Image (tube, rainbow, N blue to C red):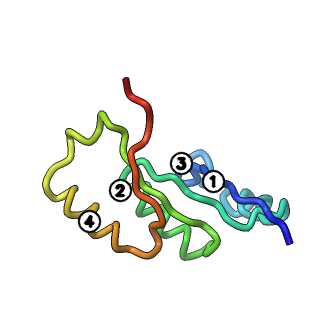
Amino acid sequence: MSYWIDSHAHMTDECYQEEFDAYMQRALDANVKKTLVICLNFEELDRAFALKSQYPFLDIAIGFYPGDVPKFAEEDWKHLEEVAKDERVIAIGEIGLDY
């Protein structure tokens, strides 16, 4: 049986929060069985973790814009190491083509 995968969704954006349940139901009704939630920072990651507890079909990726990485403090790098061990996170990477 075929189904759809949304491979790039910014579902942690505040614009989706008011009607989040309706968005998720529409996706399920359209046979979307997996959604990869792209997180741009640790705050979005925390929101994605909360959403995944309610919607297990959400997968989570976190990445950082290259211009944001120089702002990382030592504790941010340590936090990223811990995040990398979390089974809810399926991908970690750089975001964007900053020339």
Q: Amino acid at mark 4?
A: Glu
N-term-proximal mark, 3 vs 1: 1
Disc 1: which residue? 7
User: Circle 4 sits in a helix, a strand or a loop, which is it?
Assistant: helix
From the top left corner, tell me how far across and down residue 51 is, in percent.
55, 67
N-term-proximal mark, 4 vs 2: 2
User: Circle 3 sits in a helix, a strand or a loop, which is it?
Assistant: loop
Which residue in the rendered view is the most extreme toward the top? 99
Q: Quadrant of the C terminus?
A: top left
**Residue at 58% over, 53% down:** 11
* Separation of marks 4 and 2 at Cα, in angstroms: 12 Å
**Residue at 28% over, 70% down:** 82
Q: Residues within 10 Å of mark 1 (few under 14, many from 20)?
A: few
Disc 2: which residue? 42
Disc 3: which residue? 13
Q: Amino acid at mark 2?
A: Phe
Res 99 label: none
